[in-house]
Amino acid sequence: MPDPASTAPGEDLVAVGADLEPGTLLAAYRAGLFPMPVDPNRRRSKIAWFSPDPRAIVPLDGLHISRSLRKSMRGFEFRFDTRFTEVVRACGAPSRPGWWINDQIVNAYEELYDLGWAHSVEVYSGDELVGGLYGIGINKFFAGESMFHTATDSSKAALVGLVEWLKTTGATLLDVQWQTDHLASLGVVEIDRADYLSRLREAIKP
C-alpha cells in the first residue's frame, strides 16, 4: 500500500490500481487512503486511492447543532446497521451530482459489512428511511464514506447520530474526507495530511 506521506502537499490522488478485497480496503484505511473508481460507468473500473490534503474531520466534541436541526431531529428515529445496503445504494443514486458509488463499490462494502467492519446510520420518519450514512470503523477511528437525504436535515441528523454513537465507543477520530459547505455548517474542520496521519495512527491502535 503506498504511503500518502510521500505524496506532495496539496495533492489528493496517491495511486491508481489494486483491488477492493476486504484486506486491501482495510490496509488502505489504516494507511490513510480511501478508494473511488476512476470510471464509475464501467462495471470493473480501475480504482483511484485518495488521501486529501487538507483532510476534513469532525471534532467529536465540537459538532454544531443548530436550533432548527435540533427541532428536525425530534421527528426522526435512528437505527444502526439494519439496512446497510439500502443506505449505500441511496448514497450512490446515479442521479446525484458527482455520482461514483457503482455496483463495484457497493459489493465491496457489503462484504466489509458482513465482516463487521462497515456500518450504517439510518434516519427514519415513521417507517420511511429518509436519510443515512455509511463508513468504516477500525478501533477508535471511523471513516465516513457518504451520506444521503430525502427529507430536510436528515443527512445532518445522521451525522449527529453517528457522533453520539462514536462517543459511547471511545472513538477519537471521525474522518469525512473533503470539506463542503454542508459539512462546514456542522463544525467540520480541515487539518493537514501529516496531522491527520498522526491522529490516525493513534486511533487505529488496538
Image (cartoon, rainbow, N blue to C red):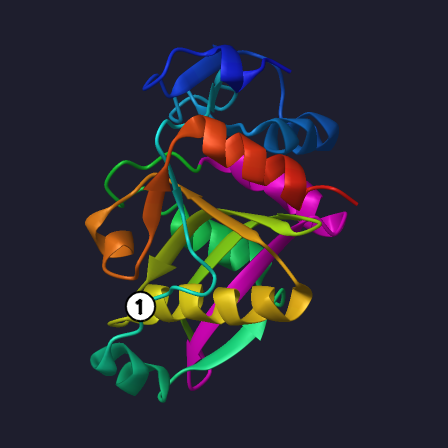
- Reading the image, the residue beneath label 1 is 64
Q: Is mark 1 on a helix, strand or loop?
A: loop
Q: In which quarter of the image is the N terminus?
A: top right
Please check the rendered image and state whether residue 105 is part of the magenta-colored stretch, yes or no. Answer: yes
Residue 63 placement: quadrant? bottom left
Q: Can residue 156 be seen in this view?
A: yes
Q: Residue at x 61, y 26 (%)?
A: 31
113 left or right of 148 in image = right
104 is higher (above) or lower (below) than 88: above
Q: How many labels does the image show?
A: 1
In percent of width and height, residue 198 lies at 56, 33
Residue 56 pos. (x, y %):
37, 42
Could you tell me if residue 104 is visible in this image?
no
Q: What stretch is highlighted in magenta?
A: 102-128
> Is 70 located above or below residue 197 in the figure?
below
Q: Residue at point 38% right, 71% down?
A: 157
Q: Nearer the viewer, residue 170 or 93?
A: 170
Is 20 on the left or on the right of 162, as rendered?
right
92, above or below 76, in the image: above
In this view, the residue in front, 49 or 204, is 204
Rendering coords of residue 23 (x, y %) = 74, 29
Query: Residue at the location (28% across, 72% down)?
Result: 151
Where's residue 80, x and y in %?
A: 59, 69
The amino acid type, in three-letter code, at marker 1 is His
Tell me if residue 88 is in the magenta stretch: no
Left or right side of 9 for 85: right
Which picture quadrant has residue 20?
Answer: top right
